[in-house]
Image (cartoon, rainbow, N blue to C red):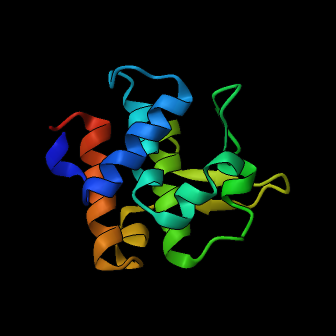
Amino acid sequence: MENLFLNKEHMAKFSYMMEELGFEDLRDPYWTSLSFTIAGNERLFDKRHSLINFDQKEINSEEWFSGTLSGGEQRLIALAYNLFTNQDFYEFDDGKRYYISPLEIFSGVDEMSYKLAKNAIDVRLKFY
């Protein structure tokens, strides 16, 4: 799995986040791919405690789709949501949906985020 990280800092943040969550192994592909994605983006990592309820081990999905993230960050968090929940959309309280498609995710991110997103899929599917 080491070859999937963007750099040593990404690997260290991932390890730190998994430790914060209380995971000692990498057998859970849902949390592993979610943590991999969040740890690979500086702003998402800084916001991790508002994105995730660490005590309850739950995602705060309403925060994920609140409109406070940049376009690239939103695409990464949408991918993390899809990899974690297996859902191809997020439904707001008013019934509107934010659809998550590969084309939307990959066409709207920079080169580093593209690599992060691609590798997060490998982490989720355990292709390492």
Nearest the camera: 90 or 67?
A: 67
Inspect this view and state whether residue 100 appears.
no
Q: Quadrant of the C terminus?
A: top left
- Identify whether 20 is placed above or below 71: above
Q: How many marks?
A: 0
Residue 126 vs residue 108: left or right? left
Residue 82 vs residue 111: left or right? right
Nearest the camera: 126 or 23?
A: 23
| Residue 51: image location, x then y, percent | 66, 49
Nearest the camera: 16 or 119?
A: 16
- Identify whether 2 is placed above or below 56: below
The residue at the point 64 percent across, 52 percent down is 90
Residue 8 vs residue 128: left or right? right
Nearest the camera: 120 or 17?
A: 17
Tell me which corner region of the image, top left, top right, bottom left or bottom right, holds residue 74: bottom right
The residue at the point 25 percent across, 60 percent down is 6
Q: Which residue lies furthest to the right in this view?
A: 94
The residue at the point 43 percent across, 71 percent down is 104
| Residue 10: image location, x then y, percent | 34, 54
Q: Quadrant of the N terminus?
A: top left
Inspect this view and state whether residue 84 appears.
yes
| Residue 42: image location, x then y, percent | 49, 65
| Residue 71: image location, x then y, percent | 55, 77
Tell me which corner region of the image, top left, top right, bottom left or bottom right, holds residue 16: top left
The residue at the point 42 percent across, 48 percent down is 13
- Identify whether 95 is placed above or below 1: below
